Amino acid sequence: MFLKNVTDIFRTVTFRLTLWYMVLFGALSIAVFLLVYVSLAWHLSKQVDEELLATAKEFNALYSEHGVEALQAEFQREAESRGVRRVFFLLLSGSGEVLASSDTRHWNAGELLEFRGVGASAGKPVFRTFHLADERGKVRVVLMPTGDGRLLELGFTLHDSELMMERYRETFGTAVVIMLVCGGLLGWLLARKAMAGVQRVTSTAAKIREGSLASRVAPGGEGLEIDNLVRTFNDMLDRVEALVNELKEVTDNIAHDLRSPITRIRGIAETTLMGRASIEDFQDMAAAIIEESDRLIEMINTMLEITKTEAGVAELASERVDVQEIAAEAVDLFRPLAEDKQVAVKLSGSPDPVFVMGDRAKLQRAVANLLDNAINYTPSGGRVTVSVHSTPESVRLQIADTGCGISEEELPHIFKRFYRGDRSRSTPGSGLGLSLALAIIKAHHGEIRVESSPGKGSKFTIIIPSVYL
Ligand code: ADP
């Protein structure tokens, strides 16, 4: 268990980001260190060489003007002022014999000899670095020809520069450790801040798993990506909650609304069986049962169609559809029903074709449902007018009637599944017509608007974007 917790920590984004920051800070500081180190070492060695050369030139000038004695005295004086353990000066004959020198007691004769072995090349000064056997470390030596066949040999220990470089290495070692700690800390803080949103999403998901579907992730302002995640997650939860509620509602409705026709079917069968039924009674019973069953099947099919259309799983054709033609066909189709009810139905406005991209059959169904309602809820002597208008943005199909209208209290509910207005109870219907029409129009990215005044009539307007799909 403990081991699993530890390995889980290694797998967290926070841990990995922390590690990345440490590696990045470490690598960066080491790169900076190397750069500074190399350039410092180069400058220091250049400085020593320049100093050696300048001193050698001064000695050379003194030697050419005042001779060996003057040079000997200057060697002595200069070596004392600089420190006899740190510098040495020699004037050598062509054969390597020492003609003048500073105090070389602290310099190993073998070493001095070894330096001499370097020789000067083609009349130019030559630089070399040698290791001393003691704590002084390295010595930088220049050999410079004097012009009369002799050689000036000067040596400076590099102890000061070496010491400086060592201090630098030590300081930098500490700095790298501090940078690593800071990098790790910064990485950890940033990762924790960035991951806080994800953590909230996880704990909300856990709450939902335990049954609290109303839980939402609180916004934290960690940054656009996390804010987007939180928003999308909350939107998804809203949608899931709406679907679950809808499912509950549908289940309740099914239980309520399908029970009535089934009870009726049962009642018909029971009455026929209980009485002394003749063969005609049985035939009537069968006919009644078929009629009720058809209604039931129709209802179930419509419900399925609404659910599929709303969920976006019903396939929508994408074709050029003339809305004017749909309106005209619907008017023709419903004219016999309207005539039976003595309701005048007409198509008004210009007959020019008006196109949208969409599913012809489904749009026909939506228009038919609205027109059917308009005729059904308009008493005889009334009027139903269908018209089509188009604007650059949308196409509008309007169905206006002079029927009973819809009260203000009923208006917000008419698009709900199985909802039926009080005044429509006496007319046949399932309460699914408007739900299906709305689902279809929404699937075409459109809307249905309703204006109604009770007693005067209603106006349903389907609005579909001109270019859809
Ligand atoms: P149904 O017509 O089967 O009852 P709908 O879903 O088509 O179901 O309509 C829901 C309710 O909206 C109807 O019961 C009715 O009360 C009201 N309604 C719809 N269209 C009209 C209309 N044109 N005039 C008055 N009321 C209407």
Image (tube, rainbow, N blue to C red):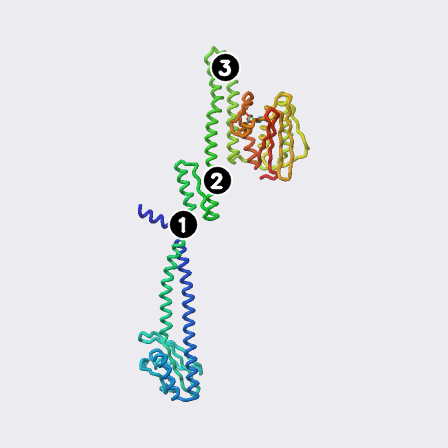
Name the element at disc 2: helix
Identify the residue under disc 3: 282
Residue 188 vertical position relative to residue 455 in the rendered view, above or below: below
> Which is more N-terminal, label 1 or label 2?
1
The percent coordinates of residue 62 (x first, y second) are: 42, 86
> Which is more N-terminal, label 1 or label 3?
1
Tag 3: residue type? Phe
Residue found 47% across the figure and 37% down from its top = 238
Report the side of 123 relative to 83 (left or right). right
Identify the residue under disc 1: 192
Q: Residues within 10 Å of mark 3 (few under 14, many from 20)?
A: some
Point out which mark residue 352 bears: none
> Which is more N-terminal, label 3 or label 2?
2
Residue 181 vertical position relative to residue 6 in the rendered view, above or below: below
Name the element at disc 3: helix
Location of residue 78 (image quadrant): bottom left
Tag 1: residue type? Arg
